[in-house]
Image (cartoon, rainbow, N blue to C red):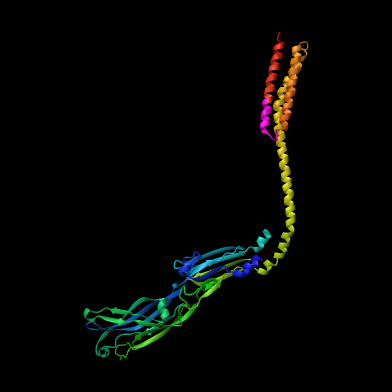
Amino acid sequence: MIYLISMLLTNRTMVTSSALTAVQASSGNIHQVYNLPTANLQVKATAKVMIIKDASSQNIIEARLIEAGFEITPVIVADDSARFAMSFTPSVFSNDDIQLTVTADGLLDGVNLTAEDRIIDVITQVTDAPKGILGGTSSAGGAAALAATTVTVEMKDFAETFIIFANEIRSGSASRPWIIGIDGTAQNAVTVDASFDLVFSGATAVAAPAGATAVVHKGLVSRPLKNIKITLTSTLFPHPVPGVPVSTPQKISTDYWVTIPDEGNIVTVPIKRSPGVKKNYTLKFTNGLQTSLTISKPSEFEALVGVPVKIAKALISIPAQLLSFKLENIRRQTTLETDRQALAKAILQTRKNEITDPVELAKARADADKAAIANKTDIVKAELDAQKGLIDAQKALVDSQKSLATSNEELKNNQAKWDTAKNELEQILKKIEAARLP
């Protein structure tokens, strides 16, 4: 029941993401911070300039831009205005493993998550960019003079790289000045204006500034891709040929299409646990853009259908396990008591042997000398005293044996009595030996 309530209330969500705010940053409940991707544009511009010179003086008369090429490439970067905090939501019924990596710029790089629901085991145990060519631009002056002057023509190529930033794309337009200096005399320096304008169609502004929403996304978030149209405009001369009348310069536009992250949309990849099974998510990202997703999940029904049977087996086995435990406990107690008794018996026998051997030796000596000193009253009396002392010693031994299990102090006292009896016996034996002497 607790398990079912937990699964219903938590919606089995494993990780959540929300826009990072100052409050969140100080809450301590953030496990990883990452940024959503956006794009800058890298524009590689090439220009072919026709340089017209006076054939006699080699002074530059005019320079015209006759070709211009543009290669536009998106550059994915981290969007500092869209920073998210990822939080892990643990579950007491699940073994979870999370491996999430981000690039140095803060973009998601790789995610591997495993959620293994352990409820059954718990029961068992308890139980690419286009290119374009545009006509060139230059000044219109000197056209009439060219027809009457002998000239030479030289072609020269120029190249430059420009960056268009994401905020300019959001604003809808951008301009880049490009003034090309042409070699000439100091008195006749010539430049060519190759500047261009860009207008973006289809770009979407950010849905909400970071921190302006309290929406919690149940999973990891990213942005989808979107195609936008770029209209690039440059001023060109349509007939840049010597001897041909030159018309007024015209603005010529060419359209390009590029794919960039859609800042107006957020995609949530849900990361959830499944009841009773081990579930694995493997997500791959390139510059914060999701490129693949692999989900491995066995059947929850197959896993959970066996739960009642396992519960019944666990309940049936409990009484037998308890009885087995009790019998094993009684057997261990009996074995312990037997070992204790054997130890006490061994100790008692050791004490008895230490006491009995000197007594038997003394008795044997007395019996051997009894016949030789039978006619002597003092010898008989000595033997009686010896026997009395022996009986007293034996009695003291019995008393000490009975009190051995309860009091070591009494054993010491009995030992003292025995020592006294032993001394008396030795005195008696000395008297006997003295009496035997002639």
Q: Position of residue 334 (x, y in %)?
A: 73, 43
Who's the residue at 70% across and 17% down the image?
Answer: 428
Front in this rendered view, residue 246 or 355? 355
Residue that protrudes farthest toward the top in the picture: 438
Q: Main secondary structure of the magenta part?
A: helix
Residue 18 visible to an observer of this rendering: yes
Q: Position of residue 78 (x, y in %)?
A: 44, 71
Front in this rendered view, residue 149 or 429? 429
Give the extent of the magenta segment: 404-416
Residue 276 visible to an observer of this rendering: no
Q: Height in image: 301 above or below 313?
A: below
In the image: residue 184, left or right of residue 350: left
Who's the residue at 51% across and 76% down the image?
Answer: 266
Front in this rendered view, residue 227 or 252? 227
**In magenta stretch: residue 375:** no
Q: Height in image: 119 above or below 195?
A: above
**In magenta stretch: residue 407:** yes
In the image: residue 355, left or right of residue 244: right
> In the rendered image, which quarter contains the N terminus?
bottom right
Q: Position of residue 319 (x, y in %)?
A: 74, 56
Image quadrant in which you'd find residue 382: top right
